[in-house]
Image (cartoon, rainbow, N blue to C red):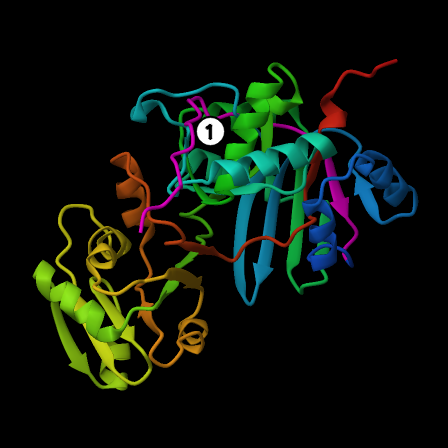
Amino acid sequence: MESAAVTPPFVARPLRLAPFRALRLVPSRIGDPAASRLFARPYRDLASRLQTWEARGMITHDPGPALYVHEYTVDGITVRGLVGAIDVSSRAVRLEDRAILPHEGIYPAQADDLADRMEQMRVNPGPILLVQDSPAALRALLAQVRRAGPDHEITDRSGQFHRIWAITDPSVIAEVAELIAPTTALIADGHHRYAAYLRLQQRDLGTAADRGLAMIVDQTDTPLFLGAIHRVLAGSSVHDVEAAARTLGIRTTLRSHEEAVALLGPRTLVVTDTETWLTVHLELEGDRVEAEVLHDQLVPSLGHGPSRVTFHHTAQEALAQVEPDHGTAVLMPAPSVAQVQRVVASGRLFPEKATSFQPKPAFGAFIRSWRDEEPDPT
């Protein structure tokens, strides 16, 4: 099954994160699915809508531009990152010159649609999520920022607890810029929004579109959890997968349900129709990962189907989608961040929906309006 996904362009170093004037929904609206759906639709009158919300106390507007330390806690897991307007105005040709590292392909039509919406609304509704192993000096500087009390403490509608520190001191902002400039950051979530940023920048050079909104998480300090995304192969059977593996010289073993689930892990996939359980044992060469072997070798070798592939964040969801005689679940091991970094360093991309970085921040804690950075028409 061929994918229409393509590699997005690369932003060149230095990595630059600029202050911006944040908009923020009130706590009862942060994490509200209805609010995120509203911003997912293009509204030409969104600027006036935001002004109305601000007048009614439904949205706040910070007094001036800042960088932000944003800490959020979900189910006992705390993640902390640096939020700002990320510069996307320069392009890299060589892999070693990249500042932002995508690890998945994008669908051009989807990126174009997102770009059209943001251009129409003149808003970045939320930050893309980036990860890196930040320099120790930057970690120490941000820890010093946090010694002061947060500017905002919020428990939102979804139950996330947020603490936010605004960095407005020009000397601290300059020090952050110096420390972050030579680094790179991996896209954890938001590949299509990243691609939309690049399209917007090319449409309107030298304007607020030269920047997008991003949050950079220090994976050494407060790591995101990297989970698996499982597959269901519609129209293919367990025996189809077993036969395809045999032709490729890949070892498989029929097992009990309990045995198979216990063995799921690095280099081992579990294939099942909920009655038959098969473990697939992969010999990974070099920096190849399990999802690449599945999609580049096993799936193209299937004798029947799949007519489509669906993706599921839990094994329970995948198993629930298996229909008797009409589908097979492939339970995947979670990739490691080190695996993702090695694949990206080589210039390759993961297959579609192969990684799930969690937990993500709730929608509405940070919104960037381009109008704050545009010249006053008067």
Q: Is residue 309 left or right of residue 62?
A: left
Residue at x 35%, y 20% (from the top left corner)? 93
Nearer the observer, 229 or 30: 229
Q: Is residue 11 left or right of residue 370?
A: left
Residue at x 20%, y 48% (from the top left corner)? 288
User: Where's residue 331, x and y in %?
Assistant: 32, 69
Task: Estimate how packed mark 1 is, as few (under 14), some (14 to 19) or many (20 or more) residues with alpha carbons within 10 Å.
Answer: some
The magenta-colored residue range is: 1-27
Magenta span: helix, strand or loop, mainly?
A: loop
Could you tell me which secondary element the residue under label 1 belongs to? helix
Residue at x 48%, y 39% (from the top left corner)? 140
In the depicted structure, whether residue 147 falls above or below residue 319 = above
For residue 194: magenta? no
Using the rendered image of the protein, determine whether residue 122 is visible from the camera's viewpoint.
no
Using the rendered image of the protein, determine whether residue 287 is visible from the camera's viewpoint.
yes
User: Where's residue 227, x and y in %?
Assistant: 40, 61
Classify residue 370 by image quadrant. Answer: top right
In the depicted structure, whether residue 332 falls above or below residue 20 = below
Q: How many marks?
A: 1
Classify residue 18 by image quadrant. Answer: top right
The residue lying furthest to the left in this view is: 249
User: Where's residue 312, x and y in %?
Assistant: 44, 65
**Dividing the image into 4 quarters, which one contains the C terminus?**
top right
User: Where's residue 92, x and y in %?
Assistant: 39, 21
Q: Is residue 370 left or right of residue 328?
A: right
In the depicted structure, whether residue 208 falls above or below residue 335 = above
Residue at x 72%, y 56% (from the top left corner)? 154
Nearer the observer, 93 or 174: 93
Q: Which amino acid type corresponds to the residue marked 1 in the rendered image?
A: Ile
Residue matched to label 1: 180
